Amino acid sequence: MDFLTNIDWVLTAACFGIGIVVGLTGMGGGALMTPVLVLFFNIPPLTAVSSDLVAAAVMKPVGSAVHMRHGTVNMQLVKWLCVGSIPAAFSGVFILKALGHSENLDRNIKIALGVALLLAASGLIFRAYTRLVQRARKRDGSMPPEDKSRPDVVVRPLPTLIVGAIGGLVVGMTSVGSGSLIIIALMYLYPKLKASNLVGTDLVQAVPLVAAAALAHIFFGDFQLSLTTSLLIGSVPGVFLGAQLSSKAPGGLVRRALAFVLLASALKLLNVPNGTTGIILVVALLVAPLLWMVIRKRHGFPALAGTRLREMKAEEEAAARAAESVSS
């Protein structure tokens, strides 16, 4: 009973909702969890980062094990990412300590977290645009059919190590980036990497990265067992439920909402005045959908997205017509 009385059930309920979003999108764990802890539950930033990382270290191996069984992991990429990310994650914690103490430390963590959230929101938008372009190329027949016998992607050690180091540093300081920033960098470095391998590789490399960051925060951060327990009790069933719903829910809509929330959280953490924040968010809310409609039209899609099944059928028909015109 003493164990149960130490659990913050309101926080657990919030983590359950965040877990659903993570299960739906595969992104947003640290990017949502830490800002919620800081902004809505008034938890000190260092404590929030420390406890969130330890909770993530418990959850990350679950998804990675699935991809390992399915063979969708490029272990050479994982190796070079970890060479850079593991020592950088430890360094991130020491940098936090060197930046100051008490209020100065909290302020510095908030700034670092705000910048990381802006990068994560930008990464979500870039990822959505890249997927739209790929769908358009596949529909038009300009993307060559997948060659299942093609050799593995040629690993570029130095750039991959640098990506790991930068990602590890950001994760160690903010808990954000293992599932958002690094995957965007991998998309840029290895454009031929299949989507399943991209996600699988990112998940597996995140396991030792988050574990290293969590270990450093246990020893040198402000880890609290009761807080981490509340996170796990809420987020684990939430992630499971979100994963079950992922095939039915409009993932694109969820990701756009996630990007908006990340933007709002970043502005708040960066102490942007409320009036300016309101203007930015209203402009984003009004302009972004119109801009996305224009982009969809430019790539030959309806301005308003229909159901995924209907769009896939239309793309298949368009690809078939393109193949017939080429053959004739």
Image (tube, rainbow, N blue to C red):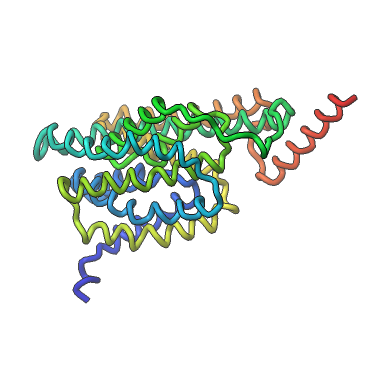
Residue 4 figure quarter: bottom left
Query: Toward the viewer: 281 or 207?
Result: 207
Residue 170 image position (x, y, % from top left): 30, 35
Q: In this view, does 196 lie to the left or right of 143?
A: left
Residue ID at (30%, 39%): 86
List the single residue furthest toward the left: 101
Q: Residue at position x 42%, y 38% from top?
A: 180
Q: Residue at x 41, y 30 (%)?
A: 160
Left or right of residue 3, residue 255 in this image: right
Question: Would residue 277 appear left or right of 151 to someone viewing this image?
Answer: left
Q: Is residue 51 above or below residue 151?
A: below
Q: In which quarter of the image is the N terminus?
A: bottom left
* Residue 117 at x, y percent in the picture: 35, 35
Q: Where is residue 317 in the image (x, y as percent from the top left)?
A: 79, 37
Residue 148 at least partly seen: yes
Residue 271 versus residue 217: which sits nearer the camera?
217
Quadrant of image for the C terminus: top right
Residue at x 72%, y 44% (from the top left corner): 310
- Count of numbered circles on the image: 0
Residue lying at the far right in this picture: please name it: 328
- Give the residue furthest to the bottom: 1
Q: Can residue 268 be seen in this view?
A: no
Residue 12 drawn at (x, y percent): 32, 60
